[in-house]
Amino acid sequence: MRGLLAGVLLVLLGVPGCAPKAPGTTPEMRVGSKKFTESVILGELVARLARLPGASAVHRRELGGTTVLWEALKRGELDIYPEYTGTLRQELFAARGLRDDAALREALAAEGLGMSASLGFNDTYALGMKEAEAERLGIRRISDLRAHPELRLGFSNEFMDRGDGWPSLRDRYQLPQREVRGLDHDLAYRGLESGALQVTDLYSTDAEIAAYGLRVLEDDLKHFPAYDAVLLYREDWAKRNPRVLAAVLRLEGLISEPEMVQLNARARLERVPESQVASEFLTRKLGLESELRSDSLASRVWHRTREHLFLVLVSLLAAVAVAVPLGVLAAKRARVGQGVLGLASIIQTVPSLALLVVMIPLLGIGSRPAIVALFLYSLLPIVRNTAAGLTGIPGDIRESAEALGLPPGARLWRIELPLATPSILAGIQTAAVINVGTATLGALIGAGGYGQPILTGIRLDDTGLILEGAVPAALLALAVSGLFELLERVVVPRGLRVSQGRGA
Amino acid sequence: MFELEGVSKRFGATQALQPMELRLPPGRTTVLLGPSGCGKSTLLRLMNGLLRPDTGRVLFDGRPLPLEEEEVLAVRQRMGYALQGGGLFPHLTAAQNVELMARYLRWPEERIRARLEALVELTRFPSEALGRFPGQLSGGQRQRVGLMRALMLEPDVLLLDEPLGALDAMVRSELQVDLRAIFARLGKTVVLVTHDLGEAAFLGQHVVLLRDGGVVQQGTLAELESNPADPFVTRFIQAQRLPLEPGA
C-alpha cells in the first residue's frame, strides 16, 4: 500500500511546472493571460513572438482576474502579461489619480515594471442591448436609460465592483434601475438572448456584438476612460532578455479594433483554438510561420489527470498528517477541541475563490497556493470525524483499557485509534471527494487540472470542452470514493465488521 | 489487602460515597452488595484507582495508591478487573483480548501460550472460539473472556463489577458455579460488586451492605440476617427473598 502511494507520488512529481527547473541558458519568458478570450489570444501572440529569438515561453492562460495577474507579475511569477491602461489607472492605481500614460509609466517604473505602447486598439467598456429592443424603446445613448427604470440590468462581476464600473456609471448618469445582477461575463450574452437581461456591459472588441445583433449605447457623458491594450512586463526580466522583449514588442500598434473583433470572433464563435488564431494572425501580418502543436484528447486528459491528482494527493496527505493528530487532541482536550473545530469550521466557510486569491500574495500562482487551500479545506471533515470516532468509543471499553493498566499512548494506538478507523476513514473519504471537486477551481490561479477545460469551455460556450473537464472530474470523484471502500476492507479491523450489536 | 481510611467521593452535587473506613483482608471473597446507586461500583473504582477519593486514602497491600499516573498503572497490573458484559475490545479476537497486556509487557511467547492454556482450562472456555471476535461470541463466552483477561497477569486481587449482570438465568447460574470453583482454586482476594442477594450468598464469604454511599452493615450473610444493624438490612434481605418464598 505504502509502496503504491510512493509510486503514484513519484509519477505525479514529474508533472511539468511542479518540478524545480534547472537554470538553463536559453532565455525564459512566462506570460500570463486573464480568463477571457482576447487576453488569451494576446498571451498566445506574445508567447509565439518570444519563441522567434529562441526563448522558451510558457503561457499560463486563463488566470482568475486582474489581481491574480498583477500580484503574480509583481512577485516575479510572471514576466509579462497583456493589460489595459484603463484598468491600470482606474483599478490598480485608483487611489493615485494618474492623469495620463506618462504618469502611469512613472508609477509602474516605481514598481519595477515596464509598459509597451498601445497594441493598436482600445477595448473600453460599453453598455449594449438587443438591437430590436433598443429600437423599440428608442434607446441610443446611455442617458436614454434614465427614462426606463424597469429595465433588467446584468453586469459582469468585475464591472459591478471596479472603480469605473456600475456604481460610478450609475452616479454619473443618475440611472434609476434597481434590478441589477452580477454574473459571469460569458453568461451575460446568453441572458440577453433569453430575455432574462436587457442591458449588459460589453467590451468594445467583443465578438458577440455583431453575432448577437447588439446595439452599443453611446457613452454620451464620456464616462468610460480609454482602455488601450498594452503589455506589462518586469524591467529586470527585460534587461536580461532585450532580444525577447524586442521580438514581443512587434505587437505594438499591430492590431486594430476591427481586427481584434475579428480575432475574438474566430476564437469565440468559430471555435478555432487561440493558438491557431494567433498563428494565423502572425502569418498574415508579419509573414511568420510558427509551428502548431496540438495534443490528442487522451494526452490532454492524461496531462490534466496528473495535474489534478497531484493537487488532490499532496493536499490530502498533508491534511491527514495534520488533521488526525488534531482530531486526537480535540477528543482528549475538550477546550482545545472546541477551538480547533471552530477554527476549521471558519476556514470551511471562506469561499474557495476568495481563499485562492488570498493565497496569491503569500504563495504566488500555480499549484502551491491551490494545494494549501485544498489542504485547509480538507482539515475539518478529518478533524471532526477523528474526534467523533474517539469520543464515540463506549465507556466500558475505555474503562477496561484503563483498568488493565495500559498507559495512555498504548491505549490510543492499540485500542482507541483502531476502533475509530471507520469514522476517520469516512472523514478522509469526504475530504478527498470534496477535494477532487474543489481542485477544479485551481485552474483560476494557474494550477491546471480538470478545471482548465471547464474554464475554457465556459468562456467559449463550448459544452464539449466543459465535459472534457467535468466528466473526468466526476469519474475521479467516483474512483476516489470506490478506492476508499476498498481501503476500508484493508484498514478497518475485521472484528469491527463481524460484530453485530454491541461494540460496533 | 485493601484499607480505606476516611474515603469519600462526590460527583457534582451527588455525594456518591460518605466518608468511610473499610478493611478487606487478603485471601477472602468480599461482596459489595446494595441497591443500584448505593455507591458500590464507585467503591470498586476507588480501589483500583480509576477514581480518586476526594478525602481520605486507599491503601493496597499496606501502601497508599500512588498519585503518579504511571505508578497507578503498574499497581493496576496486579489487580484483575472485569465488568458487566466483559468490556471486551471488539477489534481484537478473544485470544488477543486476553493476551493484550502480556504482549504489551513483552512476555515471552512460550509463557503467554502456557498462561492462556491454563486460563482456558480454568474458565472452561472452548479453545476453538479463541480466534473469534467478541461480536461472534455468546454473552457467557464474552464474560469468560473478560475473566481470562483479568486473570492473565496472575494478579494478586480480582475486582469484578456485576460480572454476571447481563446474562440470562441459565447461563448465569452455570457461570456462578464456575466462578465459585475458580475463586476456591485461586485462593485470591476477590472483591465482587452485585445487587443480587442470592449471588452474594453463593459466592461471597464476607458481605458489605451499602446504602446511599454508606456502609450499613458488614459480616457474613447469616450475621446480617440474624443480627441486623438497621431495619434496612432486614428489608433488603426480605425484598429479595420474597419472590422465592411466597407468604414469608
Image (cartoon, rainbow, N blue to C red):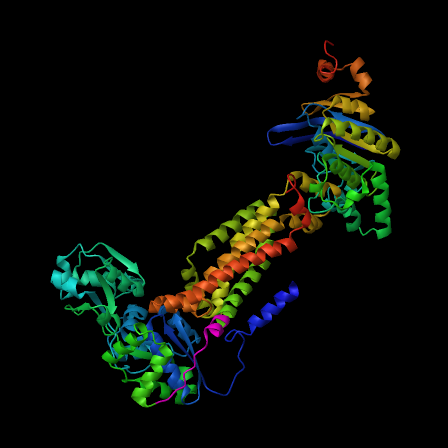
Q: Is residue A296 above or below residue A387?
A: below
Image location (x, y in percent) of residue A325:
60, 54
Please give the name of the residue rendered at 84% of the width and 32% of the height, measured from the top-left corner.
B183
Image location (x, y in percent) of residue B243:
71, 16
Please give the name of the residue rendered at 82% of the width and 20% of the height, measured from the top-left corner.
B220
Quadrant location of residue B235? top right
In the shown orientation, is residue A347 left or right of residue A246? right
In the shown orientation, is residue A1 left or right of residue B93? left
Q: Which residues are magenta?
A: A288-302
Q: Is residue A300 magenta?
A: yes
In the shown orientation, is residue B208 left or right of residue A200? right
Q: Is residue A386 above or below residue A145?
A: above
Q: For the stretch drawn in magenta, what is the main secondary structure? A: loop
Quadrant containing the N terminus of chain A in the rendered view: bottom right
Q: Is residue B9 above or below residue A308?
A: above
Please give the name of the residue rendered at 50% of the width and 69% of the height, measured from the top-left corner.
A307
Image location (x, y in percent) of residue B2:
80, 32
Quadrant location of residue B45? top right
* A345 and B74: which is toward the camera: A345
Q: Is residue A450 above or below residue A21?
A: above
Image location (x, y in percent) of residue A59:
41, 77
Asked if residue A109 can be seen in this view, the reply is: no
